[in-house]
Image (cartoon, grey):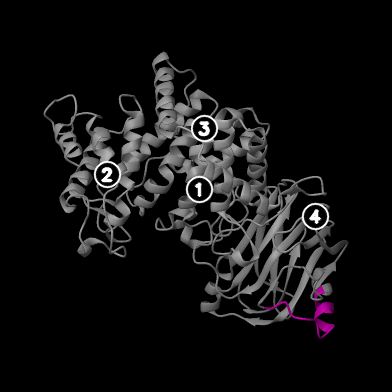
Amino acid sequence: MKNTCFIILLLLGSISSACAQFIGFEDGVPEAFKISGKGELKASSLFYKEGESSLEWDFQPGSALNVQISPLSLNAKKEKQFGITLWIYNEKPQQDSIRFEFLNKAGEVSYWFSYHLQAAGWRACWISFEYMKGGKNDKNIVAYRLVAPNRKGRIFLDRLTFPEKKMNLRTTPDQQLPSNNGLSNRDLWHWCLVWKWEQQSYDVPLASKLTGRQKKELKTIEQRLTDFLEVKKAPQGQINAAYKTFEKAAISPSIAGTGFIGTPIVAPDEQDKKKGEMSWNDIETMLSGFAYDAYYNQNETSKKNYFTVFDYAIDQGFAYGSGMGTNHHYGYQIRKIYTTAWLIRDLIYKHPHRDAYLSTLRFWAALQETRQPCPPARDELLDSWHTLLMAKFISAMMFPDAREQEQALNGLSRWLSSSLRYTPGTIGGIKVDGTTFHHGGFYPGYTTGVLATVGQFIAFTNGTSFELTKEARQHMKSAFIAMRNYCNLYEWGIGISGRHPFGGKMGSDDIEAFANIALSGDLSGQGNTFDRGLAADYLRL
């Protein structure tokens, strides 16, 4: 029946092309979009991810949304480069899928993939032909269709481009499209591995009951973290920025009864700033500013705004199981989300949406990676240490159940210790001479701040059962000794500066880390109560 309807559409002749065109559905339903079987297509303002409208498809079992295109001829190169990108709004999690099928002249399916509907809200659907399924024998495509699941329902489509002629190289597998990118198996693209890591389980057992010592250690670490993150008073500039950004976001509940409308939030690679679209840094600006105001000033409006923004961010795709099309380098833009969430954790714990907030924080911190030890071939470690170690640590500490805190912190400490092994060749990490590699070479510009972050973790866990192994701390010491040697007094020379030729230097937090490691115990083998060599370096610096 579907093929017959498709052939009839084909024979109708001149149908306007949707080829290589960005469609925001602002002008209604394009002529090339037709329904077969029972269902309805219409432009809708209930939800949108671009402009102020999207395409609403109300479907029945067995119905399909058919799209006629100008003929598209693929080859091996175009299979890799070409694909489809759009965003889909699903109102209620379902254990089924929308099937996308790409057809030849005879109406036969050459390529296909399934888009899972397990999450509610806006989720990205980005995939190249290379990672689709199907026979792929006939590479001449004249139409595609979306096949409904075996039930009635509706979804909303927006930001559609087909064919996308240059797919993003870091397209991210997620809950919706778990196998959409072969790069997910390359350790280089660590940003894009969050869903792959989510499939791992802890091999660190969950304790049935914590000992008195374990409870005391967790409380000690909790207090150390709070002391580190607290400031004397709320930073008014950041609070003002939160309110200014919130006004631009224009968040309001959808009249559909679920979800929101407002300024779209997308990954930076997709963001159109001229249209006022927002990204992760805007989420961070709002959440951190409102958290400061709620924590220090007990501002009730900021408390309310904080949770409105978090709900909206999840609805827009900054959520558990979502890759937002491409998530690369997000760590640099979300760090304050975590440090301020810790300050208002008691408010989060009491909120009805607590589990959604915490699962989002854990997922985007990539805490799931630490359910297993760090594999020896894991690359780009400096990026992970610098941007996500604090996020991982806070996420581990924010489990409401202290037993899960203990399990997560054990896993994190073990993962970090194993990641601090000396790495071979040119992959990222610490080398036997103490130099630190990133992007295939020695890179001090990435080292500064990175070692300081690991040093902070050492200070938080010092004297507890969660501290790093002695070997890991000795490797850290060698990296600090190397930094001490190639800096004079604080700066390194242009010859080793990489793509940051000017102003490369140790920061005050790097210097403080000398003391943090020194106080974690004597790593010289002389049996002192602290490491006198590192302590001397700290005092000199």
N-terminal label among 3 and 4: 4
Q: Which residues are magenta?
A: 6-19
Q: Check the picture and name the quadrant holding the N terminus.
A: bottom right
Q: CA distance from mark 4 to mark 2?
A: 52 Å
Which of the labelled discs sits on residue 334, or is there none? Answer: 1
As rendered, which of 357 and 11 lies closer to the eye?
Answer: 357
Name the residue beneath numbered marker 2.
421
Residue 13 magenta: yes
In depth, the one of 303 and 96 nearer the eye is 303
Looking at the rendered structure, the kind of residue marked 2 is Arg
Query: Disc 4 marks which residue?
Result: 46
Of callouts 2 and 3, the N-terminal one = 3
- Determine the residue located farthest toward the right in the rendered image: 38
- Dot 4 or dot 2: first in sequence order is 4
Q: Badge 3: how crowded within 10 Å, few (<14), some, or many (20+)?
A: many
At horizontal 84% and vertical 64% (from top left) the residue drawn is: 41
Q: Secondary structure at mark 1?
A: loop
Q: Nearer the viewer, mark 1 or mark 2?
A: 1
When asked about the image quadrant of residue 133, the answer is bottom right
The residue located at (13%, 31%) in the rendering is 525
